[in-house]
Amino acid sequence: MAASLDSSSDSALGCQPRDQMRFARIWILAGQSQATTFGMNPNTVPASWKLDPGVHIWVSGPEPASSRWEVYRPGVNSAPRGQWGPELQLSARLRRGNPTTQLFLIKHAPGQTGAAFDPGENDWSPLSQGEAWTRLDGMVNAALKTCDGRVDAIFWMGNHSDGLRQEKAERVGANMKALIDLSRLEWGSQIKWVVGLPDDTAPYATTVQRELRALAASEPNVVIFETADYETQEDGLHYNTRSVHRLGDDFFETWTALTAGK
């Protein structure tokens, strides 16, 4: 199904009334191209998808004043524009069981970005000014100014690039903890992190996976899930359509298990 490129019916959602935001969730999707997801375009949007006015995504314009919430259209206004990812199934699962809950998505997942500081590469380190963290921080803070809400959870699928070099792989736990700590300092101490383990194609992937398991075991409100048997595209790295949906399902089910009884 080719998603319609006509967004003329959208209006800037602006600030949401306080009584509405009590029944809303603000979720962040971040990481690298496995979360984007690379290769997903308007032509791969499933025919079963239907526009849901209860699911919104933050669209960053060329100027801060032109950024706004829009009703989510995969392959149109998902990030980056023209692609879509696990947020399609993730949002569908939430709304199916919670039809009165409004969902607000903020997504930033640039390719080839690890958590380690690297002066020569784009990365997620807070030490790298103007790169992935700075961009996400600006998006989230701008979005939060428009609504009376708080970030509930961050869904992360990345760290493949950290597995390309041993010194980066061995620091994944510490580097991800720095991101988690900063996100909670910025947007709320109870933010939940739902993390998919990266694939095993990088030379030091096993080290990365070990570090992430240890982090989840020691850090409250951080949980991981396995992706070892996900199917990929021909490049052997990026997920095919079936696995993109599965990633959304696993995000949702892991978040549900984490929040059960809370």
Image (cartoon, rainbow, N blue to C red):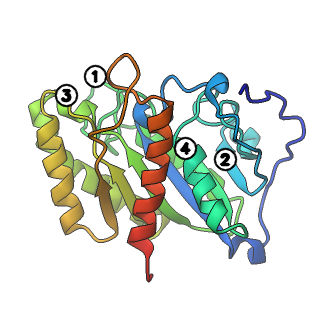
Identify the residue at horizontal 26%, vertical 35% (top origin). Answer: 199
The residue type indicated by label 2 comes to Ile
> How many other residues sit within 10 Å of disc 4, few (<14), some (14-19) or many (≥20)?
many
Circles 2, 4 touching at the beta carbon (< 8 Å): yes
Which residue does the numbered mark 1 point to in the structure image? 120
Q: Position of residue 185 (x, y in %)?
A: 40, 65
Q: Position of residue 112 (x, y in %)?
A: 35, 27
How far is mark 2 from mark 4, CA to CA?
8 Å
The mark closer to the camera, 3 or 4, is 3
Quarter where residue 47 is shown: top right
How far is mark 3 from mark 4, CA to CA?
25 Å
N-terminal of the pair, mark 1 or mark 3, is 1
Q: Position of residue 69 (x, y in %)?
A: 73, 49
Residue 234 versus residue 259: which sits nearer the camera? 234
The mark closer to the camera, 1 or 4, is 4
Residue 173 is marked as: none
Left or right: residue 212 versus residue 229 is left
User: What is the secondary structure assignment of the residue under circle 2?
Assistant: strand
Quadrant of the frame with the C terminus: bottom left
Which residue does the numbered mark 4 point to in the structure image? 107
The mark closer to the camera, 3 or 2, is 3
The residue type indicated by label 4 comes to Lys
N-terminal of the pair, mark 1 or mark 2, is 2
The vertical placement of 190 against 245, above or below, is: below
Which residue does the numbered mark 2 point to in the structure image? 57
Circles 3, 4 touching at the beta carbon (< 8 Å): no
How far is mark 3 from mark 2, CA to CA?
32 Å
N-terminal of the pair, mark 3 or mark 4, is 4
User: What is the secondary structure assignment of the residue under circle 4?
Assistant: strand
Which residue does the numbered mark 3 point to in the structure image? 202
